[in-house]
C-alpha cells in the first residue's frame, strides 16, 4: 500500500487543545535516510507535531502513519523503533551517565550485556566516555544534551526525532551537537527535527517545511526555499535613528525586488548587493552601515510570515 | 488489521505484555533505589524502635497501670504495635507516592522519558506501584521483626499481618499516585494531604486508642479510611483474635480501594503523559 521508503506520512494532521488549534491540518512525508526539518517560531505547532509523531499525543484529526503503523493503536510498537530527543532533557540527574542509559535501555527490553556494549559505543560517539560513572547533575547543558542524544540511540532507532536539539546551548556546545547530528546523518540515520534557528535548519536539513500558526507555509530544500522566496543577495542598511523612517520611505523606490523595514534596519532583496548600494547612494542616501549578504532561511521566513523567527 | 501490522507487532521483542512492561518501569525505581537504600533501611529500623519504645513501653507502662479492659485485656504495647504496623504502611506508601511521582512528572520528567519508549502510561504507573509494594514489604518485615523483639506479638497469625499491612499501603499508594500525577505546577496540595489527611488518620484511626473512645458522630469517618481497616486487621491477627467475617469485610474494603486507585491511575497517568 505504501512506498516502504516513506517512514512517516501525515494528511490533514490536526492537534487541538480545547478551543486552541496547535496544529491545523498539515501534510508531509518523511523518506528513509533524509533529514527533515520543521522550521518556525515558538508556538508554531512544531513540538505538538513532534509529540504526535512520538506517539505520546493522540492526533485530534487527520491521518498519521508511522513506519506503516497507526500511532493510536500501535503506539508501543512504533515507539520501540523511534529515538526521541525531547526539548527538555528528561534525564535522571541523580543517576550516573551510564545508569541513565541502562534504565532507558531496559525500557526497550534490551539485555544488560547489549546495553553495556552500546553504552560504551554511544558515550564514545557523544564524547562522554570519561564521564560514564559521573552523576548527571553537574554536567554542562551541552553534555546533558549529548547524553540525551546517546540515550535516544540505545534502541538503534529507525527514525530519530529531535525537538529543538540545540535550544538553550551556547554557540560552542551547539556546534558540537551539530557535528554529532551531521555524523548520524552521514551514517544514514533518518532525522526529523524542529528548530527556530535558521542556521541549524540550513546546516542539517535536506528538506524542510516552514511552519507558522499551526500550518505549513512552504516546503522544500533550504536552497529551493531561498530560490523561490528570496533573492540571491540581501543588502542590509542601517541609518541613524532620526533618519530611519524617512530613508525607509525613500527606499520604496530603490531598485530592489522587495523591501523589509525592521525596527533598526532596512533590508533590500536584490540580485547584486553592491550594485544596489551604489544606486542607493545615487538617490542621495548615506547609511551608517551597510552589509551585503546571501539570502538565508530567515529571509524566507520573513517573506512568508512578515515576522522574524526569533520574534516568535 | 493488515497482515503486515500483525507481523510488525509480533516481530518486535521490544514490546510485551502488561506485566513485562510494568517490570521494566519498576527497574527504573530499583536502579534509583541503589543510591538511597542505606538511609531507607536506617529509618525503617529506627522508626518502629522509637515508637514502640517511647509509646509502647514508656507511655504503655502508665496506661497498663490503669487497667487494660478498654484495650481488650492486653498490654498497651501489644495493642499499639499492630496499629503502628498498619500506620507505618500508610507512611511508607505516602513517602513513595506523592513527591516521587511529582518529581518524576514535573521536576525531572523521568516519566516523560519513559513514555517515549514502548512503555504505556499505565505500565509506568504499575511499575511505580510495584516498587512501592517492594518497599512496603521490606519495611513491614523489618517492623514485624522488631515487634517480636519487643515482645509485642501474641499469636503466630501475625505472619498474615505482613500481606495485610502491604495491602493497606497499596490502598494508599495507588490512589495517591493517581492524584499526584495530576498536579501541574506545584506541590502545595501535598501539604494539605499531610496536614488534613495523613496526620489525623495517623492519630484517630484506632492506632493509639480504640475508636470506641471517639465521639459517636465521628466514628463513621474512621470507618471510611483504609487505615482503620488495616489497623483492625493487623491487630486481630497479632493478638490472635480474628473475627473471620469482620476481617473479610476489612480485606474486601482495602481491595476495593486499592483497585479503585489502580483504575484511577491508569486514567490519570494517560491523561498526563499522553496529551
Image (tube, coloured by chain):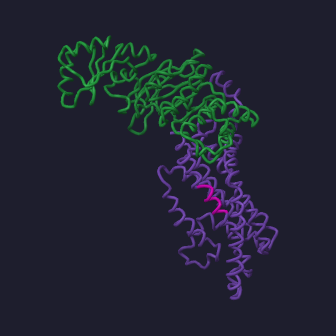
Chain colours: A green, B purple
Indicate the position of residue A106 as horizontal and vertical percent values.
Answer: 69, 38
**In the image, residue A38 lies at what x, y percent?**
46, 26
Q: Is B105 situated above or below B237?
A: above
Q: Nearer the viewer, residue B49 or B135?
A: B49
The residue nearer to you, when weighing B253 against B272, is: B272
Q: Main secondary structure of the magenta part?
A: helix
In the picture, the quarter occupied by the N terminus of chain B is top right
Residue B190, position as x, y percentages in the image: 52, 59
How many numbered callouts?
A: 0
Q: Is residue B236 visible?
A: yes
**Whether residue A163 can be seen here:** no
Q: Which residues are magenta?
A: B89-97
Q: Residue at x 47, y 24 (%)?
A: A201
> Outermost residue, bottom direction?
B66
Residue A166 in the image: state x and y as whole percent: 50, 32
Quadrant of residue A33 in the image?
top right
The one of A15 and A45 positioned closer to us in this rendering: A45
Residue B4 magenta: no
- Vertical relation: B268 (above or below) A152: below
Task: Indicate whether A96 appears above or below A244.
Answer: below
Amino acid at each position: 500500500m505504501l512506498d516502504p521508503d516513506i517512514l512517516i506520512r501525515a494528511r490533514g494532521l490536526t492537534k487541538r487543545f480545547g478551543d486552541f488549534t496547535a496544529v491545523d491540518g498539515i501534510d508531509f512525508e518523511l523518506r528513509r535516510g533524509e533529514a527533515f526539518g520543521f522550521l518556525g517560531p515558538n508556538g508554531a505547532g512544531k513540538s505538538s507535531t513532534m509529540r504526535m509523531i512520538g506517539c505520546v499525543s493522540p492526533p485530534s484529526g487527520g491521518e498519521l502513519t508511522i513506519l506503516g503503523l497507526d500511532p493510536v493503536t500501535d503506539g508501543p510498537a512504533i515507539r520501540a523503533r523511534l529515538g526521541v530527543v525531547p526539548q527538555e532533557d528528561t534525564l535522571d540527574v541523580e543517576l550516573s551517565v551510564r545508569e541513565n542509559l541502562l534504565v532507558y535501555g531496559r525500557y526497550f527490553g534490551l539485555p544488560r550485556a547489549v546495553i553495556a556494549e552500546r553504552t560504551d559505543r554511544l558515550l564514545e560517539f557523544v564524547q562522554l566516555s570519561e564521564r560514564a560513572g559521573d552523576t548527571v547533575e553537574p554536567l554542562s547543558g551541552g553534555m546533558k544534551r549529548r547524553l540525551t542524544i546517546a540515550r535516544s540511540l540505545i534502541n538503534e532507532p529507525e527514525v530519530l526525532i529531535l525537538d529543538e536539539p540545540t535550544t538553550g546551548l551556547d554557540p560552542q556546545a551547539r556546534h558540537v551537537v551539530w557535528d554529532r547530528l551531521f555524523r548520524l546523518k552521514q551514517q544514514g540515520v533518518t532525522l526529523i527535527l524542529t528548530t527556530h534557528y535558521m542556521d541549524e535548519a540550513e546546516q542539517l536539513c535536506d528538506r524542510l517545511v516552514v511552519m507558522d500558526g499551526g500550518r505549513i507555509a512552504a516546503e522544500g530544500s533550504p536552497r529551493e526555499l531561498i530560490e523561490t522566496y528570496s533573492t540571491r543577495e540581501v543588502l542590509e542598511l542601517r541609518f541613524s535613528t532620526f533618519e530611519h523612517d524617512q530613508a525607509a520611505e525613500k527606499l520604496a523606490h530603490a531598485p530592489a525586488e522587495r523591501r523589509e523595514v525592521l525596527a533598526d534596519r532596512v533590508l533590500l532583496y536584490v540580485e547584486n548587493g553592491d550594485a544596489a548600494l551604489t544606486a542607493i547612494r545615487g538617490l542621495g542616501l548615506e547609511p551608517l552601515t551597510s552589509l551585503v549578504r546571501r539570502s538565508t532561511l530567515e529571509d524566507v521566513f520573513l517573506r512568508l510570515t512578515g515576522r522574524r523567527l526569533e520574534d516568535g | 488489521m493488515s497482515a503486515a501490522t500483525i507481523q510488525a507487532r509480533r516481530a518486535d521483542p521490544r514490546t510485551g505484555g502488561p506485566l513485562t512492561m510494568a517490570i521494566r518501569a519498576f527497574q527504573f525505581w530499583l536502579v534509583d533505589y541503589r543510591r538511597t537504600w542505606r538511609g531507607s533501611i536506617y529509618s525503617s529500623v529506627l522508626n518502629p524502635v522509637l515508637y514502640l519504645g517511647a509509646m509502647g513501653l514508656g507511655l504503655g507502662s502508665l496506661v497498663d497501670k490503669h487497667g487494660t479492659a478498654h484495650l481488650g485485656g492486653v498490654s498497651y504495647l501489644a495493642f499499639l504495635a499492630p496499629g503502628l504496623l498498619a500506620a507505618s504502611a500508610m507512611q511508607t506508601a505516602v513517602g513513595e507516592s506523592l513527591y516521587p511521582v511529582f518529581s518524576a512528572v514535573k521536576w525531572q520528567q523521568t516519566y516523560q522519558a519513559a513514555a517515549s519508549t514502548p512503555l504505556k502510561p499505565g505500565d509506568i504507573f504499575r511499575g511505580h506501584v510495584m516498587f512501592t509494594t517492594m518497599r512496603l514489604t521490606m519495611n513491614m518485615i523489618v517492623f514485624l521483626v522488631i515487634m517480636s523483639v519487643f515482645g509485642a506479638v501474641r499469636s503466630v497469625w501475625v505472619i498474615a499481618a505482613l500481606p495485610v499491612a502491604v495491602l493497606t499501603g497499596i490502598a494508599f499508594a495507588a490512589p495517591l499516585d493517581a492524584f499526584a500525577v495530576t498536579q501541574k505546577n506545584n506541590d502545595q496540595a501535598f501539604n494539605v494531604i499531610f496536614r488534613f489527611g495523613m496526620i489525623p488518620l495517623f492519630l484517630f484511626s484506632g492506632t493509639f486508642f480504640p475508636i470506641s473512645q471517639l465521639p459517636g458522630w465521628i466514628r463513621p469517618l474512621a470507618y471510611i479510611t483504609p487505615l482503620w481497616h488495616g489497623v483492625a486487621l493487623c491487630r486481630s491477627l497479632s493478638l490472635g483474635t480474628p473475627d473471620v467475617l469482620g476481617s473479610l469485610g476489612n480485606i474486601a474494603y482495602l481491595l476495593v480501594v486499592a483497585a479503585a486507585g489502580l483504575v484511577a491511575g491508569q486514567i490519570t497517568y494517560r491523561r498526563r503523559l499522553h496529551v
